[in-house]
Amino acid sequence: MIRLARGILVVFLAIAGHSLTIYVPAIAGFLDLFLIVVVYYAVTTEQVNAMAVGVACGLVQDVLFSPVIGVNAFSKALLGYLIGGLSSRMLLHQAPAQLMVLGAATLLQAFVLFALQRILGFSAEWPGGQHLFLGALGNMLFGGLFYAALRQRQRRVR
């Protein structure tokens, strides 16, 4: 029950952070808090939990911020599955590995969203290289701070 409450709290924090991009549009393309949460759960919990968090975060993001329901949910569930599987086979608990995975997840999510929009018949443009680089860099910087804060909190609890 505590895990569920913690997960709900993290999703609400991601909603609040993503809502901030509406009021500060300059950071909108450089920060995806839902993706940061999904990657965190993928490298620290089991693969099924990462998929569930991916679906939950994606659906919340779709309902609140996207005109197409299900696209972000599918992409985040897929990323949670892939990264969770990779995490079970490789040691991804150190900060540099988590940041590299977060950067790669940002790029992979852009590809999955582009492909899904094209498959569904929507007009989609591939984001430019500079936009992808800055998005990955922003997610890695903020994700690093977020992961460091969570590690500090876990050390204090122990």
Image (cartoon, rainbow, N blue to C red):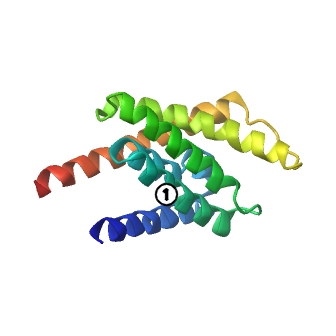
Pick the front one: 114 or 49: 49
Most foreground residue, 100 or 51: 51
Q: Position of residue 105 (x, y in %)?
A: 54, 37
Question: What residue is disc 1 on?
Answer: 52
Residue 65, can we see it? yes
Taking depth in this image into account, of 48 and 144 the one nearest to the observer is 48
Which residue is at the front of the view, 16 or 61? Answer: 61
Q: Is residue 31 left or right of residue 155?
A: right
Name the spot of residue 30 as percent of width and height, x first.
Answer: 57, 44
Q: Quadrant of residue 124?
A: top right
- Residue 138 to residue 13: above or below: above
Q: If the image is split into quadrants, where does the N terminus sit?
A: bottom left
Callout 1: few (<14), some (14-19), or many (20+) C-alpha neighbours within 10 Å?
A: some
Instruction: State whether residue 98 appears in this view.
Output: no
Residue in the picture at 59% in, 31% down? 133
> Residue 73, position in %: x, y?
62, 56
Residue at (40% x, 63% y) in the render = 10
Q: Amino acid at mark 1?
A: Ala
Q: Secondary structure at mark 1?
A: helix
Residue 151, percent from left and from top: 23, 47
| Number of numbered markers | 1
